[in-house]
Amino acid sequence: MQLSPKYTLNNGVGIDVLGYGVYKVPAEDCANLVATALDSGYRTVDTAALYGNEEGVGTAIGNAVAAGTPREELFVTSKVWNTDQGYDATLAAFDASMERLGLDYLDMYLIHWPCPARELFIPTYKALEMLYREGRVRAIGVSNFEAPHLHELLAATDVVPAVNQIELHPWLAQTELRAVHAGLGIATQAWSPLARGAILNDPVLLELAARQGRSVAQIVLRWHVQSGHLVIPKASSAERIAANLAVFDFSVSETEMAAIDALDRGQRSGSHPNEVN
Ligand code: NDP
């Protein structure tokens, strides 16, 4: 069974380079799909309170542990939703997520969006720091933070976020923000790494994939890995779930990497972080 290589976060905690994302996985399918992913070799699962499927994630994780997979080999991320921002509300939201997940501890907890108009991401993050200090979560971080949000956060808090999970794929390369992350020791985790599937028809990628004898999804995921991104693709069939993890036995050449880099056109498949509140 192929496992993802590990990446060491800025606090020494290991996370899989490639994990399984469950946004838009229906609650009733989630336990089965996460179990399929775990059977395929995934060890990291990305969910959020918003997704409405934390119970399914927890069921699959619990079953895997009961069947002999050590809990320490598994890595579960969840996120505090926008309407739960604020110190006390975040602590309550964390408890509610943990209840749904049925876990003793969480591996990573993120602020889902900065929501600049709410002006609450600093007290929200201070609640994450408290959970981290109490040992209830092994790593804390943020999602959808732009550089000014990161700088404002760092000026007011103590723990440098382990990750910033952002929309990132060849059509949206996020070059400047990734450089900011590198300077601060924050890992970049790519959401919608396949641009929600839209990028799979890109003619340049189709040609590269044909030349390599790989799927376009595999070429794009390999580009992420070689670019140093953590990545959490979502898929709904056992075949696609397994194929998306099978990107550690080939490489994309420097010329091919440059051809994929050149596809950047600043095109989002989701919202701009300043517009979500
Ligand atoms: P992805 O870029 O992962 O694309 C998922 C889409 O691509 C699905 O329609 C899927 O189809 C299709 N797909 C996946 N693999 C293949 C394949 N091998 N061949 C063909 N089609 C494929 O989009 P997501 O938006 O789901 O992002 C991934 C994860 O990132 C989410 O699940 C979530 O965990 C996280 N995320 C975080 C956000 C945040 O704000 N922090 C926002 C959005 C996502 P099918 O399902 O039918 O197999």
Image: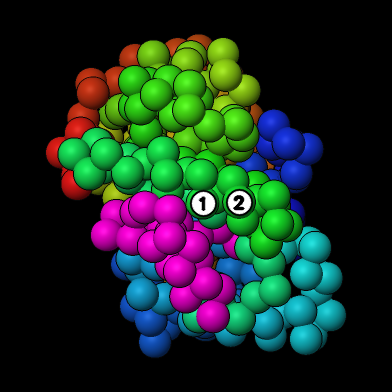
Residue assigned mark 1: 127
Residue 222 image offset from top left, x and y in percent: 55, 35
Magenta span: 75-99
Magenta run includes residue 219: no
Q: Amino acid at mark 2?
A: Met
Say whether marks 1 and 2 touch (CB < 8 Å): yes
Picture layout, residue 154 above or below residue 145: above
Picture layout, residue 102 above or below residue 89: below
Q: Nearer the viewer, residue 57 or 132?
A: 132
Magenta stretch: helix, strand or loop mostly: helix
Picture layout, residue 186 above or below residue 254: below
Q: Where is the N terminus found, in terms of image quarters?
A: bottom right
Residue 217 image offset from top left, x and y in percent: 43, 45
Q: Residue at x 64, y 42 (%)?
A: 17
Q: Nearer the viewer, residue 138 or 52?
A: 138
Q: Residue at x 30, y 50 (%)?
A: 196
Q: Residue at x 69, y 32 (%)?
A: 10
Other-residue count near label 1 (Cα within 10 Å), few / some / many at <14 / 14–19 / ≥20 = many
